[in-house]
Amino acid sequence: MNPEFRRNVWLELTARRIFTMTAVLLLIFFAAALSSDSAPASAAVTLYYFIVVFWGARNASLSVVGEIRDHTWDFQRLSSLGAAEMTWGKLFGSTIFNWFGGAICLAVIFAYRLTHSGLAASLINLVYFIVIGVIAQSVALLASLVAALRRQAHTRLEVFSYQAVGILAALAAYLVWSAADPAGSVLGRSTGSDVVPWWDHGFDAQVFLILSLAIFAGWTLVGCYRAMRLELKMRNGPYVWLAFLAFIGLYVAGFDAWLPNKWTLGESNAVALRLALAAWTYAVITYLMVFLEPKDAVLYRWLGAQISSARVGAAAVRLQAWMMSHLAALAVTAALLAWFVKTDSIAAAAFVVAAFGFFTRDVAIFVLLQSLPGPRRGDFAALVTLLALYVLIPSILRALALAESPPTAWNFCRPELFSVRAVATRLGELLGRAPRFVGQETETALLVDATRLCARLGPPPTALETMLAWAAHWVQSGGRDLGKPTHFEVRNGSF
């Protein structure tokens, strides 16, 4: 047996803990059975999410960083255990007690589903619960390993952040699986579907989504293994990452039928949309990896020397993940650009060139801020720089056209005129209630003229109907009401 896994089993599965977990769960299920036949299964689902997903993600995130905080990790790294043994031992050894409790919950869930849904549906549901637990725990471990590679401090808040990443990954898996639930998703507020369109074919939703989740769970385990190799001072080759890029590009590109019409590139057909989806996916991965991976100036100089000496093969095997993702984005963008040129979509081609240029500039900012001489500025400095480039500076430049001396007063409102009665009546229709009016309108009103502002900045982008729909949805969803008066009745301008 794996020595690290065996050590964690001895530490986690003591007789007292096993008895306590079993007794507490059985008492909860017994109490739930007193209310209804389905209550034990519902309680088992809730307990499984808490024990395996929430609690298990925390134990997984502490499996390595806890050793680092206790100053025992260096001794373990010097042991004869390989990366696979260490990954397996840390991931499933530190969470073995959670899986013990989860197994009891799964037994209750499976027994209930077996009697109500049949064997096939019960097995698929069982696989889903196992997969979501693996995703939560492996992503939490991966987040802690990435933080360890970045040599971050491991405070309680940071450990909670690793756990939160795993929980968010599990939440994403839950929302994906809810798409195959005929009752729909409670959190997503969507209706379930029986068929998933992918690459112009319709697939059974449950089978497709459970296979997708299982594959992504496998990739998270591979990510933990490769991160553990780096933490153990081993070198990773490029082929596994290239295989992941090929998989994720093909996987995401097949969902072009899911895009709303307003997101499509003009009259582009499926080929352009699929290339755009793949390029967007590679861009997102590049942003993520350039933020997470350590920026090694020595490695960059070595790569430059290898390429200048025409030893491209030696440099290719040492490329970081963000570099390979950027090259993949470049290749797909070039194919997309060639397609637009072929179809005479010059405006779309120009947009693609500009977007890729901004994307490359952003990546360069992350690298340069870490590689320039002087004190290290960190990746958050790059995030602040991008915030300034995309939000602050454009806002300032746009506002300069409005700056005058002496200052000019601008009327901020919509250019159209709406009566209070018409707006209240329409809002009442959206809420399903008739408004009650007190008093009578007069023939005059105090109005605001926004003609000059709209001439400078353009008309408001959000229609009144959209704003009323938002307000009605907020009220119907139980949103907070500030309880402030509208002062719609004021006629002297003093509010």
Image: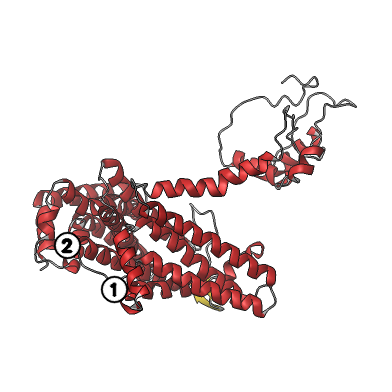
> Could you tell me if residue 194 is visible in this image?
no
Label annotation for residue 89: 2
Q: Is residue 460 left or right of residue 4?
A: right
- Disc 1 is placed on an element classified as loop
Relative depth, front residue between 244 and 256? 244
Q: How many marks?
A: 2
The quadrant in which residue 135 appears is bottom left
What residue appears at the point 73 percent right and 34 percent down from the top-left corner? Answer: 412
What residue appears at the point 70 percent right and 35 percent down from the top-left corner? Answer: 403
x, y percent for residue 348: 66, 68
Q: Residue furthest front?
A: 309
At label 1, the amino acid type is: Gly
Q: Earlier in the sequence, mark 2 or mark 1?
A: 2
Relative depth, front residue between 167 and 251? 251
At label 2, the amino acid type is: Gly
Kindly identify which residue carries mark 1.
237
x, y percent for residue 365: 45, 54
x, y percent for residue 261: 66, 65
The quadrant in which residue 10 appears is bottom left
Q: Quadrant of the image for the N terminus?
A: bottom left
